């Protein structure tokens, strides 16, 4: 009887761990796809914004914003973020992601 319980517990543990692994993989895949989509959208947008004076002027503010983990928000960065969102309303990127994209220009 004890070996049956041990075998049952081991089988339950295997099933539970495989379900957790599957859930983890699915979550990781979903996050990866979302990250790739944002990166591609920002990349496409960055090529059109590379010569944009509003965005180029916000580089120092973007650097401060990224370095302070979002605590320092300069006026030029705010203007650039507003401008970017007007140019690409479909873009679902955070302010930090956009600031990093500005720095990558």
Image (cartoon, rainbow, N blue to C red):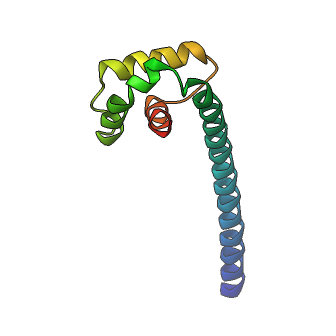
Residue 59 position within the rendered picture, expressed as x and y whole percent measured from the top left: 38, 31
Residue 47 position within the rendered picture, expressed as x and y whole percent measured from the top left: 61, 30
Q: How many marks?
A: 0
Residue at (67, 79) in percent of width and height: 5
Pick the residue in front: 31 or 2. 31
> Does residue 38 sit above or below 79 in this rendering?
below
Q: Is residue 60 left or right of residue 49?
A: left
Pick the residue in front: 13 or 61. 61
Residue at (46, 19) in percent of width and height: 53
Residue at (66, 82) in percent of width and height: 6
> Does residue 16 sit above or below 11 in this rendering?
above
Residue at (65, 85) in percent of width and height: 2
Q: Is residue 45 left or right of residue 58?
A: right
Q: Tell which residue pokes out farthest to the top in this image.
A: 86
Quarter of the N terminus within the rendering = bottom right
Q: Is residue 43 left or right of residue 75?
A: right
Splitting the image into 4 quarters, where does residue 14 fall? Answer: bottom right
> Does residue 19 sit above or below 87 in this rendering?
below
Residue 81 position within the rendered picture, expressed as x and y whole percent measured from the top left: 45, 21
Pick the residue in front: 47 or 67. 47
Splitting the image into 4 quarters, where does residue 58 fall? Answer: top left
């Amino acid at each position: 009887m004890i070996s049956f319980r041990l075998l049952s517990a081991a089988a339950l543990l295997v099933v539970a761990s495989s379900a957790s692994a599957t859930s983890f993989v699915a979550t990781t895949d979903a996050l990866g796809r979302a990250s790739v989509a944002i990166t591609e959208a920002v990349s496409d947008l960055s090529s059109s914004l590379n010569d944009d004076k509003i965005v180029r002027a916000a580089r120092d503010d973007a650097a401060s914003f990224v370095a302070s983990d979002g605590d320092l928000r300069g006026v030029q960065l705010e203007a650039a973020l507003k401008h970017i969102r007007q140019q690409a309303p479909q873009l679902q990127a955070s302010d930090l992601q956009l600031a990093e994209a500005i720095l990558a220009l």
